[in-house]
Image (tube, rainbow, N blue to C red):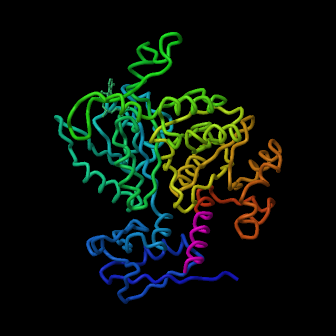
Amino acid sequence: MTKRTNIELPIDPAVDAEPALAALSARLPDIGIAAAAADSTAAHLTQREAVPAGWDWFTADATQAVIGFPRNDNVWSRIRSLFVKAVAFVGAGPGHADYCTVMGMKALQDCDVCYYDALAAPRLLEHLGSAAQAIHVGKRGGVYSVERDALEVMMVDACRQGRRVVRLKGGDPGVFGRLAQELQALEKWGLPYRVVPGVSSMTMATTGTGMLLTSRGISRGFSVTTPRLATGDAGIPGADELRQSPILFFMAVGKTHTIAAELIADGHAAGEPATMVFGAGTANESIIHGTLATIGDLVENQGRGRPGLLVAGPLAGRTNLYRRDGALGGRHLLLLRPAGDALNRAVLATHDLGGVPVEWRAGEEAPRFDVVLLDDAEFANRFIATHGTDALAAAAVFSTFATDSIFPDLESTALHQPTTAAVQTIAAHLVQESIRSTS
Ligand SMILES: C[S@@+](CC[C@H](N)C(=O)[O-])C[C@H]1O[C@@H](n2cnc3c(N)ncnc32)[C@H](O)[C@@H]1O
């Protein structure tokens, strides 16, 4: 029998609590939300203005009532992860709107609010939905139209309200784009995000003009830097600073031992971080962290026959982009759906809930996945006919959920519910499990 856990939620008499309580109960059917009139420090359903300073909050429904909770409260942070949507940091590209990626365009089409910099391609904003808000936060006349701190508060609050936020930045957001600072603002509050890289002006001004950065016989690599220092001064980096900059090696698999040994012989510390990224951006992306002393053996054991890019230097190892504390805990969800709106919505829901969406079409290499969602019987049967059941048997869903009511066996996978609902059901299941185990 399921153990139930009642969560107390004191209610401010000034708010209409019904919609929020209904939304909580619908998303967390196995956990009772006990509404109490008394004050409590655990959480409070109240008005935005009444949330104590330093507390965190979110909205569970479209009304103005908010659920305030002490910052980092484990239970309410987990519950909130079911209601907020991942903020998408999207690279706008350098000039023409068509240089924005398809993934970036999809994010624009789906968002409720878009905070954008001064864009080389304002036409991109035509891709926003008719109800979406576009807010300029870039520079006008050399001065930011919105202070950076204020922008971070705006983004964080929109996310807490369950709005789907896009932060659109010129070029590639990770190249001189202050991306790290804006990500930290969300990380500080434990809110989810994802990054959609873009075409940088760096590649546009080189590949796009014919100055090919790695022309055979002319150059084996290049360095990218800025004369601007964080202090506001200017100056090019000296030899020591350049030595500490990250070095990226393409075509490094099979040569990792040699690269590491030569870097050490050249004065780099043996303990300097080194990271190999295999299959970046594919469903099978995998990352190996080590040091110059260890990376050769690590790569040799795990990476044979796969394309990889080695990063050496102080930035290596800092691959913290996929949050592990969302409701889905970084799990890879295989979404078996023909391409279309339902699949797009399921992909978004998976990002929102802290998972990694994985698709697999016939003829493609088998991806890595932890959970498989079979919600369309006909498609599932075709999939099994193509790929066999062995691939599915390896998925955690059969061990994690086999005894649960979600996926009792393959036959009952003819669940005629939208995939988004199935993603949310799994996420809610995991959150409820974690709440039960901590309460
Ligand atoms: C704050 S940085 C942002 C760079 C951006 N994240 C990128 O990946 O292109 C702005 C600088 O990028 C360069 N830049 C941006 N767009 C450019 C373009 N279309 N052509 C040439 N340089 C450009 C200029 O040096 C400009 O001062």
Name the spot of residue 142 as percent of width and height, x first: 18, 35
Left/right of residue 69 with respect to residue 310 in the rendered view: left
Indicate which quadrant contains ligand 1. top left
Residue placed most toward the observer, 319 or 51: 319
> Image quadrant for the C terminus?
bottom right
Residue plotted at (28% across, 27% down): 236
> Which of 243/112 is in front?
243
Image coordinates for residue 90, horizontal then vertical, percent: 42, 40
Q: Is residue 273 left or right of residue 165?
A: right
Q: Is the magenta stretch mostly helix, strand or loop?
A: helix
Residue located at (69% from left, 37% from top): 300
Q: Per the image, is 434 magenta?
A: yes
Q: How many marks?
A: 0
Q: Is 367 colored magenta in this rendering?
A: no
Give the residue at x 77% y 62%: 412
Give the camera-side residue of 294 and 121.
294
| 10 w.r.t. 430: above or below | below
| Residue at the (22%, 49%) spot, across then down | 147
Q: From which residue to which does the magenta span run?
A: 425-439
401 left or right of 240 in image? right
Q: Position of residue 66 (x, y in %)?
A: 36, 71
- Pick the quarter of the image with the N terminus: bottom right
Does 420 appear above or below 251? below
